[in-house]
Image: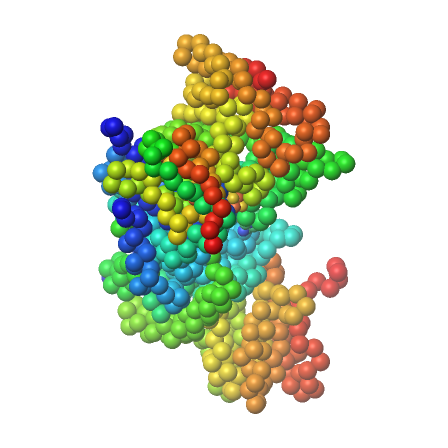
Amino acid sequence: MAVRKPPITTREYWAPGHAACAGCGCAIALKLATKAFSEAMEEKYGDPNAFAIAQATGCMEVVSAVFPYTAWKVPWVHVAFENAAAAASGIDAAWKKLGYKGKILAIGGDGGTADIGIQALSGMLERWHNVVYLMYDNEAYMNTGIQRSSSTPYGAWTTTSPPGKYSIGEDKPKKWVALIAAAHQIPYAATASIGNPFDFVKKMKKAAKVDGPAFVQVHCTCPTGWKSPLEKSVEIARLAIETGIWPLFEIENGDFHNIKIQSPGGGAKVKREGGKVVAIEFKKPVEEYLKLQGRFKHLFKQPEAIQVMKEQIKAMWKVLGVDVILP
Amino acid sequence: MAESPFKADIERVEKEYSEKMTPGAIVYLPGSSVINKTGSWRVFMPEFHKDKCVRCYLCYVYCPEPAIYLDEENYPVFDYDYCKGCGVCANECPTKAIVMVREKK
Amino acid sequence: MPIKKVMKANEAAAWAAKLAKPKVIAAFPITPSTLVPEKISEFIADGELDAEFIKVESEHSAISACVGASAAGVRTFTATASQGLALMHEILFIAAGMRLPIVIAVGNRSLSAPINIWNDWQDSISERDTGWIQFYAENNQEALDLIIAAYKAAEDERVLLPAMVGFDAFILTHTVEPVEIPDQEVVDEFLGEYVPKHAYVDPKRPITQGSLGFPAHYMETRYKVWEAMENAREVIKEVFDKFEKTFGRRYHIIEEYKTDDAEIVLVTMGSLAGTVKEFVDKKREEGVKIGAAKITVYRPFPIEEIRALAKKTKVLALLEKDISFSVGGAVFADTSRALINEKEKPIILDFILGLGGRDVTFQNLEEVVDIAKKALEEGVKEEVYWIGLRKEIL
Ligand SMILES: Cc1ncc(C[n+]2csc(CCOP(=O)(O)OP(=O)(O)O)c2C)c(N)n1
Ligand code: SF4
Ligand code: SF4
Ligand code: SF4
Ligand SMILES: [Mg+2]
């Protein structure tokens, strides 16, 4: 039997021995992101190692770089929680002066990106640095013990959005930073998921290859914070796509009239007009995604909350120009 | 048997490991985390059945550590020094070539 | 040949930056230091300075970008003041902890509230524990010179700490004085290129900067900063010696003025030293045995120099434009530390004055001298005095 080539480079930039929880979806994202970057740099500059990382404080920082060890095999700088984009700006500027060819990868969690770091992010994008910002979105502040962020989805339990007599859990819909990033009219902004790794890798490569800034928001399961079975980290992320919870899209140059939507799979029926996705009829119910995660357990006692969630999902898709039907 | 892509890192860190303070607590040994054998975290271990493997690479792509590398024929090799036993590989394997079994201690 | 130009301290700071040739500059406007990034923009626009100027969206990002660039191994510069420096606070610790010799020009200004754009030293004094070397300039020439000296000291391998150079808001930042601009080649020779051995972001040599320090390692990293700051004492002396040889101007960690037989020494920093020296001259004419001392290097705190000074006099009167509530001025606390175990020590009195741009007049200084004399004759009744307070509106 003829064997296909491995679908991704076997070069490694993220070494084992790091302290991420077993089954950490964010670790999967970082591993793939660096491999994708390496491929892109090889294709663009002929040098697979022509990149460096500036990373925000958060789970993936504390598990990967504990003196005197590091999981990184690529130049890596951590400064603080809210300034990965600013630190990346500085490295980018230094590389320009040093005449280095390559690209800077800034990495932040949802807290470090959607909340405390959004100003630095906006500044970096607006100044057109040669930086890809990767937001690994595990939908809460995990490093400090699972507090809500503005990227925590509606209904989710976190330690600061506990359900109770007067609370259904998180009571605000998720903030979509990819849309905010795209509004800077940067060359490339996208959402991705570890539930579709090849799409994620493709997008990271695109992002890495553009001249100027790019932004990718990747959905990553956190089994610890989501109270989900370790082995289901990828399955859950995939279900988020298949049930309509997590849209996969690309926006180039801030062109909101031509958002590229990727097929969600899972049997969903996609309707296109003039090549554009205009409607999706999902076949897998949102509940399939929710029921695998302890953070949504309480919702099954409050079906009206799930209804609210569904309305929010529809509204979010509407922003993307897509009418959706949810089972 | 193929070599771990981290073999050089493992050898290097064993030789050069030092707690000596560096300016700014900079870590000069890339990939030195390999000194931490996280395999000890495991409760269940992935058992690989080569006969069922179709070399789809999904386990290789997904392993978060990574504790899976490829042999000369591109079959997955499980590195039990680092595998934390999460079971993602087994869950995603389309042919059930990976089975999680309780760790024999 | 060096040229003389009439300029504000802000321009002098921009000139110093130009001469030091940082590769990356990141700055955000704030009164009174806005002219620094403006002037630098002009230098770059005119092709006189070849640097990347990152026009950041905040001071937090300014210093963060400097940290990124400095971690990548290039010389960096920024300028700020007051709220801007306070906004940088978190990252100032990090810059020192990561051992990145960034230089900041600080137009010393008060901190809100109430918002006030005028001079005191609360902004940089409040950063005294961040691990930054601190210089205070008396005039515009010193602003230029000390920035160049700051790079030399900060980048020394025995030090590798960031440094800030303070110069008083408006009194210096906006006041023109003649300033001698050294030749570029001479500055190039003096500073050399910054090619750090410890910090770089180079794909050929991947290293990890900004690691997490568990209790097993954290204390040692802090100790290393302590050690570096201790080393800075000697290094700064060497730098000042070399500076004199190269540029002909002499700097001292503490500059003494008519202290040899002085019973009272007025100790201060920044531009106030000029006023105080004039005042000393006046009092000397009146036959009062008085002297002055100017702290040029505030961090590392000049412990030995303070001890030497203390041996010469009966009263150290500290004139401070900063306050650590419930204690007094920061220099007071530091001076006390320097002298606490000395067998014989002078009376130490602390005078808080000039906050938020309040003028410091000869009349204020007379009051200081009166209090000092009284303490000498009758013993110390109080240690901390607010001078020039408008008691009638309290
Ligand atoms: C200025 C500041 N505020 C708060 C913290 C504490 N803190 C560290 S990481 C973190 C949460 C990180 O959340 P996120 O960015 O989502 O990353 P995650 O840990 O979830 O991967 C917080 C609140 C900090 N380090 N710095
Ligand atoms: S808490 Fe979540 S994000 Fe953090 S390491 Fe564990 S699984 Fe990963
Ligand atoms: S069980 Fe988890 S850690 Fe072990 S090889 Fe499989 S995916 Fe990797
Ligand atoms: S996922 Fe299963 S079939 Fe695919 S390569 Fe791994 S073991 Fe083989
Ligand atoms: Mg998070």
Instruction: Name the image quarter holding the N terminus of chain A.
Output: top left
Q: Tell me what residue is drawn at x 62 percent, y 37 percent.
A: A294
Task: Provide residue C259's location: percent of width, then percent of height.
Answer: 49, 82
Q: Tell me what residue is drawn at x 26 percent, y 30 percent.
A: A3
Can residue A129 be seen in this snapshot? Answer: no
In-image side of C151 versus A221 (left or right): left
Q: Tell me what residue is drawn at x 58 percent, y 33 percent.
A: A292
Which corner quadrant of the figure contains ligand 3?
top left
Q: Is C22 drawn above or below residue C254 in the view shown?
A: above
Can residue B51 be seen in this snapshot? Answer: yes
Task: Provide residue C212's location: percent of width, then percent of height.
Answer: 47, 57
Colouring chosen for the image of the structure: rainbow
Instruction: Name the image quarter holding the C terminus of chain A.
Output: top right
Q: Nearer the viewer, residue C329 or C180?
A: C329
Q: Tell me what residue is drawn at x 40 percent, y 66 percent.
A: B19
Q: Nearer the viewer, residue C175 or C165?
A: C165
Task: Provide residue A129's location: percent of width, then percent of height.
Answer: 38, 38
Q: Is C285 drawn above or below residue C170 in the view shown?
A: below
The number of numbered badges drawn on the structure is 0
Q: Nearer the viewer, residue A80 or C102?
A: A80
Task: Provide residue B45's location: percent of width, then percent of height.
Answer: 45, 45
Q: Nearer the viewer, residue A157 or C197?
A: A157
Q: Please, which residue is most extreme toward the bottom here?
A: C343
Q: Please, which residue is most extreme toward the top here?
A: A273
In-image side of A72 versus C223 (left or right): left
Q: Please, which residue is most extreme toward the right here?
A: A165
